[in-house]
Amino acid sequence: MIGIFAFYLFATLTILSGILVIFARNPVHSVLWLIVAFFNAAGLMLLLGAEFIALLLVMVYVGAVAVLFLFIVMMLDIDFAKLRSGFTRNLPIGLLIALVLLAEMLIAITAANSGPLIGDQPASTAQSNLSAMGELMYTRYLVPFELSGIILLVAMIGAIVLTHRDRGDVRGQKIHHQVRRDPEEAIRMTTPESGKGVEL
C-alpha cells in the first residue's frame, strides 16, 4: 500500500515539475524545477528496485543541472537584486517544497525496504542491484569498462587541445631568461629617503 501511494506521489510530482520547467518564466526557477523532477524520477527508480539508475539520476543529472545553472548565471543578464527582494515572501513556499522532498525520500526508503513495486517475487534476493552490476562490471566486462574510461580520457584531452589557444598579447614569465639575466642590468626597486637621491 505504501509503495503504490509513493509511486503515484512521485509520478504526479515528476509530471508537475516537468510542466513547471516548461512554463516558468525565470530560467533559474525552471532549472530548480528540473532538479525537483530529477529527484522524483530517482524516487521512482528506487521504488522499482533500480538503485543504480536512481543514483545515476541524482549524481549525473543533478550535477549536470548544477553546471547548467552556472552557465545560466554567467550567460544571461539576470537581475538578482529583484529576485532577492522577494526572498522573504517566497520562503514559506521553499520550506514547503523542502518538507515535501524530505517526506518523499523517507517514503521511498520505507517502500524500498519493503521490496520492489513490480512483481511478487524479486528475481534475486541474495544480491542487490548495485552489487550485481558492480560484480559484472569489474569481472566479466572489465576490459570494455577500462576501454570506455580510456576513450573518455582521450576525448577530454582532445577537447582541451582543440579549444586551447595561445594569445600573443599576454605577457607570461620566461624562466630561462630570468635565470640567465645579468644582475648589473636588472632593474632594482628602491625607496629613497626624503631629501636624498638614489646612488647608481
Image (spheres, rainbow, N blue to C red):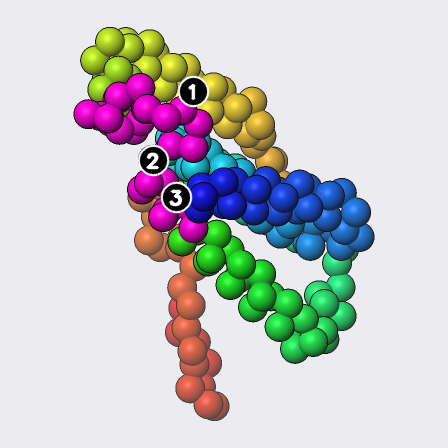
Label drawn at residue 131: none
Front residue of 163/124: it is 124
Q: Position of residue 113 (x, y in %)?
A: 31, 42
In this picture, is 1 found above or below 164?
below
Q: Is residue 114 magenta?
A: yes
Q: Residue at x 56, y 22 (%)?
A: 162
Q: Residue at x 35, y 55 (%)?
A: 184
In this picture, is 49 found above or below 83?
above
**Label 2 to label 1, Cα distance in Å?**
36 Å
Instruction: Please identify the residue farthest to the bottom as the structure is shown.
Output: 195
**Label 3 to label 2, Cα distance in Å?**
7 Å
SS at mark 2?
loop
SS at mark 3?
helix
Placement of the C terminus among the 4 image quadrants: bottom left
**Residue bounds of the magenta highlight:** 107-133
Residue occupied by mark 1: 152
Residue occupied by mark 3: 111
Instruction: Please name the amino acid that badge 3 sits on.
Output: Ala
**Label 3 to label 1, Cα distance in Å?**
37 Å
Instruction: Please name the amino acid that badge 2 sits on.
Output: Gly
Can residue 73 be seen here? The reply is: yes
Instruction: Please name the amino acid that badge 1 sits on.
Output: Leu
Total marks in image: 3
Lower position in the chain sequence, tag 3 or tag 1: 3
Residue occupied by mark 2: 115
